[in-house]
Image (cartoon, rainbow, N blue to C red):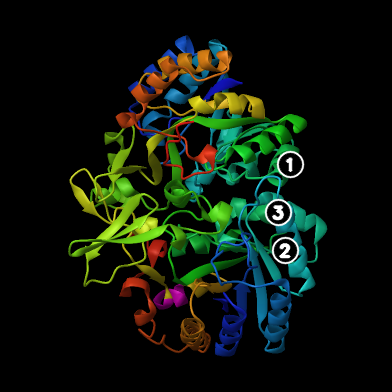
Amino acid sequence: MDLTLGPNLFFWEAERVRDFYAKIADEAPVARVVLGEVVCSKRLPFWQGEIPVAVERLRAAGKEVWLSSLALVTLKRERTLTEELIDAGVGIEIADLTALAYVPEGAPFSVSPLINCYNVGTLDWLAARGARRICLPNELPMESVATLAQAGKERGVAVEVWGFGRQPLAISGRCYHARLHDRIKDSCQFICNADPDGREVDTLDGERFLAVNGVQTLSCATSFVGREIPGLLAAGVSALRLSPHTGDMVGLARAFDEAVKAGANTDALEAAARAVAPGGQLANGYLHARAGAEWVDA
Amino acid sequence: MELVCPAGTPAALRAAVEAGAHSVYCGFADETNARNFPGLNFSPKELAEGVAFAHRHGAKVLVAINTFPRAGDESLWHRNIAATEAAGADAVILADMGLLAYAAKNHPNLRRHLSVQAAAANPDIINFYNREFGVKRVVLPRVLTVAEIAAINRETPEVETEVFVFGGLCVMAEGRCSLSSYATGKSPNMNGVCSPATEVEYVEEGDQLAARLGDFTIHRVGKDQPAPYPTLCKGCFTSGDQVGHIFEDAVSLNAQDILPQLAKAGVTALKIEGRQRSRSYVAQVVRSFRAAVDALAAGQPMPQGALAALSEGQATTTGAYAKTWR
């Protein structure tokens, strides 16, 4: 089992993006990095110049690199953007099935957790179409993860599980960041860049609940599977995905790397996870077939 | 335009057909469909009887098998696809890629529609579903404007489109939302339920009534006020110094006023949400929409306002069909 750094879901300044991937390339023990704009095509012009720079830097450091598509493709401009990803000479990760429509039959691709791969029938179909890696949807319980990891092994598909990060829960046509500022999506003024880990949404009781990120809704609690490492190893899961936050992702990747090599969670890993998680709040309910927001003291 | 109406029970199916539905859609009484509620849905025998009844009255029956099968347990979904064909139903509505591939291979003569739960939102993916799985109709997700729907129809000549015009309104791309399971452990994709009643609790707090879903308060109203059902995305929350319906108000969809635009956009079928609704509700909505569709076909003005009282929280929206909703 190794580590994948997932695409940054938030709207970060170009400079922060550049520094982040340079540091990851030089210091983080991750085997591969997926990058690209997942959430909103309107953000892309502000940082797309950083993508080739990061790809080159990461490759030079020996990382495997994949480019993610958008999670929801509706506009003509977005269709064109998605089709152009195929020509970039970097493997594509499909986050909307639309991207697969442009992938030549049999060409390799990776599958985002935002694609609904819940069962062996779908895994089979994706594998036959050329899938090499599949990061499973977050809400799957360990039993399903084990079934799919086994099926993946038999078909030469690496099955990956969300290991750390606020979890993507929904994507919409409506921009909630804009709505919170009494704007509509077309006149958003890119306000989502004010919240580089997402903007928190609490219940009326003041309980921390969700986080909005433009058109995306995330969990407020940060998913963390440190305590499930032995079970995930036994299930044959091939990688854990770490989703970028503004905290110390290099330190977190190092702690994960050590724990995975040792075959079990460590205090250092859990401390690193709490340090990076916004508000220090962790959750692991989904793998235990519970509500995703729950923290099961496993 | 074809009017596609909900049938949560055999009685609702008959009521919808008698009220003028061109088609009805329904599901089996298990977790294979996205309205897996107690006391709802059909056995294979009831489905066969319902299909016979509908066909006698010139109406079609579409069967929704639109959840995502549990890993290692796909046989239940496969059996229901076979039962759909055996009952003589006119189409099966699927969302899962594995099931689409299975149905195309094993039941090639059963017409395949793409469920809204697959959230196919542009011409390229719709044509892809047609090419790969022989999908003949796609139910469009509620993230598109009328102009975008028109553009889709221009570019997908092999595929019909069906759009929601009335009832519950998802504000997220359907089939890509796990808000419900985050709070309750149960989701539309895996269990066919959203914000399920088994996880809802109303708690009296002084002169207020709090509606809780799982461990989370979704909204709180004065005891003498109407308390909407605590669907997660319609809840009242806080963010920074703001308090309110961050995602969507307690509104439901009513696109009756824009039926002419939808017709012009090339839409084939209009879908009414509400398999969980009563027979009398279904009959009333179907009758009203049938009158509107008939008026439209005859070039007469749309009948106004007949449905307002039936809408959730008495407030309605045209949702994403208008660009400013976003």
Query: Do the dots labelled 2 and 1 sit on one chain?
Result: no
At label 2, counting other C-alpha atoms closer than 10 Å, the crowd grade (few under 14, some 14-19, many 20 or more) is many
Q: Where is residue B39 in the image (x, y as percent from the top left)?
A: 56, 72
Instruction: Please tell me which residue lies in front, B224 or A57.
Output: B224
Return the residue nearer the eye: B177 or A280: A280
Of A111 and A272, nearer the camera is A272
Give the spatial CA distance, label 3 vs label 2.
Answer: 11 Å
Task: Point out the image quarter for the N terminus of chain B.
Answer: bottom right
Q: How many labels does the image show?
A: 3
Q: Name the residue under label 3.
A: B99
The residue under label 2 is which amino acid type?
A: Asn
B259 inside magenta stretch: yes
User: Answer yes or no: do the residues labelled 1 and 3 have beta carbons within 8 Å?
Assistant: no
Q: Nearer the viewer, mark 2 or mark 1?
A: 2
**Given the image, what chain letter belongs to the residue carrying mark 3?**
B
Looking at the picture, tell me which residue is in the foreground, B74 or A64: B74
What span is in magenta? B256-261
User: Are discs 1 and 3 both within one chain?
Assistant: no
Mark 3 belongs to which amino acid?
Leu
Dominant secondary structure (helix, strand or loop) of the stretch shown in magenta = helix
Q: Please tell me whether residue A194 is drawn above or below residue B101 in the rendered image.
A: above
Label of residue A275 in the image: none
Q: Is residue B242 positioned above or below B262 on the image?
A: above
- A75 displayed left or right of A176: right
Q: Mark 1 lies on which chain?
A: A
* Mark 3, secondary structure of its residue: helix
User: Marks 2 and 1, how far apart in space?
Assistant: 20 Å
Distance from the alpha carbon under mark 1 to that under mark 3: 11 Å
Rendered image: mark on residue B80: 2
Q: What residue type is labelled 1?
A: Asp
Q: Mark 1 points at which residue?
A: A124
Element type at mark 1: helix
